[in-house]
Amino acid sequence: MPDSFDWNDVKTLIAAAEAGSLSAAAANTGISQPTLGRKIDSLEASLGLKLFERGPQGMTLTDSGADMLAHAQHMQEAASRLSLAATGRAETLEGTVRITAPQVMSAHHLPAILTRLLDEEPGVEVELVATNDTENLLRREAEIAIRMFRPTQADLIAKKVTEMHLGLFAAKTYLAAHGEPTLETFADHRMVSYDRNPLIADWLRKYGIEPPSGFLCLRTDDQVVHWNMVVAGAGIGPNQIAVGEAEPLVSRILPNLDLPPLPVWLTVHEELRTSALIRRVYDFLAEALSDLS
């Protein structure tokens, strides 16, 4: 029979398996590589099993390790649900709420919104994760998510709170050098585009514009960098109208174009909706974000 084992050692198994190496797991967890190695050794000794084959290319799960990983992930999910249930029954308005939101939303809208929240609720602390990646609410990577699409994950409550209208913008320096574009001359200009996201190219094709070589001259999926490139004069780029019109260095172009709006969804795990703290922050965000339209 295996000896009793430490749950923290089990979490190390998950971290190492998902990262593929101790060095990557150390970077992801903030735990030193030697400590992670000792925890895995301890877990292997407790279970009486060899969980990993270690080699120059990293760590590979053994068959036993793969079996144990599946059980460990079930344990992690159960622990997350336990934590969610406990948080959901908390009645205090003090504590930390982790919010994830897209980069543009985080950089341009949430600073003022979260400042008002902190002024009204001095017992609340906020961790803001500015990312376009999907954070897992069930695994407590975030308590509340702001998304530009409707989440479909089970056990989530999603509410559409507003729509953000989009426009095309170019730096005044760019327009002075290249002239004001029309729909007919649009392909003669430069455009700052996204890289892996086909949104801009698909939108151009909707208007019968096949992007020529060199038109999508600079591509990045980092939305903050994308907008800074537009402001610097690299080319034409889209943004939320409220953000673009607040920037004095750019001008809106082709204002009659009908760009599809971005829906804004506020999402929370259903267990957390019963927490006084999470409910307060959720309701505050819902009202504040609805005002952005």
Image: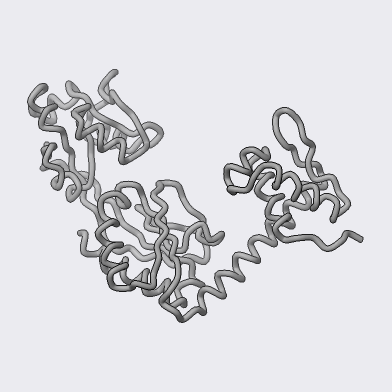
Q: Residue at x 14, y 47 (%)?
A: 246
Q: Residue at x 43, y 65 (%)?
A: 97
The answer to which of 32 and 279 lies nearer the viewer is: 32
Left or right of 2? Residue 262 is left
The answer to whether residue 177 shows anywhere in this view is yes
Relative image position of residue 255 (x, y in whole percent)? 11, 42
Number of marks:
0
Quadrant (top left/top right/bottom left/bottom right) for the C terminus: bottom left
Q: Residue at x 82, y 47 (%)?
A: 64
Query: Which quadrant of the structure image shows residue 75?
Result: bottom right
Compared with 67, 174 (above or below) is above
Relative image position of residue 76 (x, y in whole percent)? 66, 60
Left or right of 16? Residue 103 is left
Quadrant (top left/top right/bottom left/bottom right) for the N terminus: bottom right
The answer to which of 267 and 177 lies nearer the viewer is: 177
Left or right of 66? Residue 29 is left
Query: Which quadrant of the structure image shows residue 193?
Result: top left
Quick one: which residue is furthest to the right in this view? 1
**Colour setup of the view:** one colour
Q: Residue at x 48, y 71 (%)?
A: 272
The answer to whether residue 181 shows anywhere in this view is no
The answer to which of 146 and 167 lies nearer the viewer is: 146
Relative image position of residue 231 (x, y in whole percent)? 19, 34
Quick one: which residue is furthest to the top in this view? 213
Compared with 221, 258 (above or below) is below
Relative image position of residue 135 (x, y in whole percent)? 48, 53
